[in-house]
Structure formats: structure tokens, C-alpha cells
Image (cartoon, grey):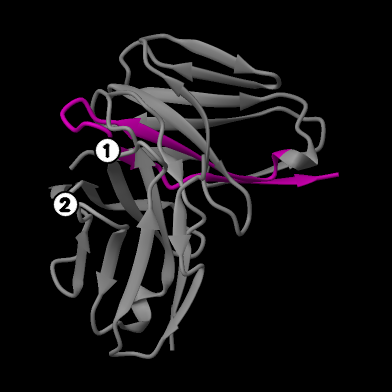
Amino acid sequence: NAGVMQNPRHLVRRRGQEARLRCSPMKGHSHVYWYRQLPEEGLKFMVYLQKENIIDESGMPKERFSAEFPKEGPSILRIQQVVRGDSAAYFCASSPGTRNTEAFFGQGTRLTVV
Amino acid sequence: GQQVMQIPQYQHVQEGEDFTTYCNSSTTLSNIQWYKQRPGGHPVFLIQLVKSGEVKKQKRLTFQFGEAKKNSSLHITATQTTDVGTYFCAGGLPDSWGKLQFGAGTQVVVTP
């Protein structure tokens, strides 16, 4: 059973470009969460999705950021017109979605904006 | 808004010593989870506590959930160099299925 797969592991973008981060949850998991981690800081919740639905996006910046989890394929976190402050590690986690279950994390995508 | 605070932010420990990291929530939690992240790695689940006053042990690690389900602690005895990393607590919110509110973490450095 493959774990949570994130790609790419490292992504370099110039200011103003778009960044697309992909996350394939564990088999059987229908709930996906995205977190952002700035250097030397903790994990900040961004968005919580089920298949084809955004459940909670209270941690998403209002502009330039969007997320989706289509019926088929991975979840995508999209950052438009990236700025230097977007440089961070972005972690995806998945769970079966029942209450009181652990989240399994992917290895993260480390985004660097130059 | 709901917040989970963790202290201390940094913990320097001599090998063989004990230490404790604390986690406090501004609101009642449905559960508390603990994760460990090695430098350059990703968070790895350690344990989950659900019941008020619950205590769980994993070898040298002891986890506690407060009676009011608002605070938790992780105590490590006889620290080893393999304990290096950042320990995060994450609170499950009663009104939000599956969403976890992470603390900022305690970064642990072990000196031989």
C-alpha cells in the first residue's frame, strides 16, 4: 500500500509564474489536507478537501491560491503568480475521513521562488 | 480563532536526560495527536489520545491528555540522539471532521 505521494519533491519557480503541487492520497483515503510549513516554523492548515468538494478552506490565502480534488486523479494545490513569500514546504496529508483517525503525510513539496 | 500553543519552542537536552513538551488549546478538543518530524523530513504520526485524562506510553515516551481535553504533554525519558527532531501536537476539532490544528512544534536538539 503506497503512502501519500507528492510531486514534485522540489520545485523552483520565478516570481510571477504558476506552481502546481500534486498529491495522491493513500489507497482508500478520500480526505486530503494541505499544510504549509515555513522554515523553522510549524505546520499551518490551508485546506481540507473530499473528492470534488472543498470542506474547509479557512487557511487558504484569499488570492492566488486554489485547491481541487477531482473525482479522478490527484489533488492539486495551485499557486498563481508566485512571490518570494510563497517559498515553503507544502505537505499533503490524507485520512479515511472518520472521526479521530490519524493523518498520513506525504514527503512534501519544497517550493523555492527565485 | 481556535489555537494550539506548544512550549517550549526549542529544547536542548543532554543525552540521558528527561524532558517534557506541552501543548495547550484555547478550546476543547475531540482528540490530540502527536507527530515527529526529523530535519528535512515529513511529519510522522506517533500517537492519538481521545479520552479525558488518557495516558499512553511508547517505550521511553509518555503521552498525556488533560482532564478538560484542552492540554496534552509528551514526556521523554533517557533522551537518545535518535530523539532529535521537531515534535508537533495536533488538536482535532469537535466540529470539524478530520481537520487538525497543529502547534508550532518543539524542536529538540540532543547533545551527547
Tell me the amino acid under the disc marked 2: Ser
For the residues marked 2 and 1, what is the alpha-carbon distance in whole angstroms? 11 Å
Tell me the amino acid under the disc marked 1: Lys
Q: Which residues are magenta?
A: B83-112
The quadrant of the image that shows the C terminus of chain B is top right
Q: Is residue B56 above or below residue A104?
A: above
The quadrant holding residue B14 is top right
- The verdict on residue B35 being magenta is no
Left-right relation of B60 to A67: right
The foreground one among B54 and B4 is B54
Residue at left offset 45%, top offset 48%: A4
- The verdict on residue B98 being magenta is yes
The quadrant holding residue A27 is top left
Residue at left offset 36%, top offset 36%: A28
The quadrant of the image that shows the N terminus of chain B is top left
* Residue B22 locus on image (x, y percent): 48, 31
The residue that mark 1 highlights is B99
* Residue B95 locus on image (x, y percent): 15, 28
Q: Mark on residue A58?
A: 2
Secondary structure beneath dot 2 equals loop
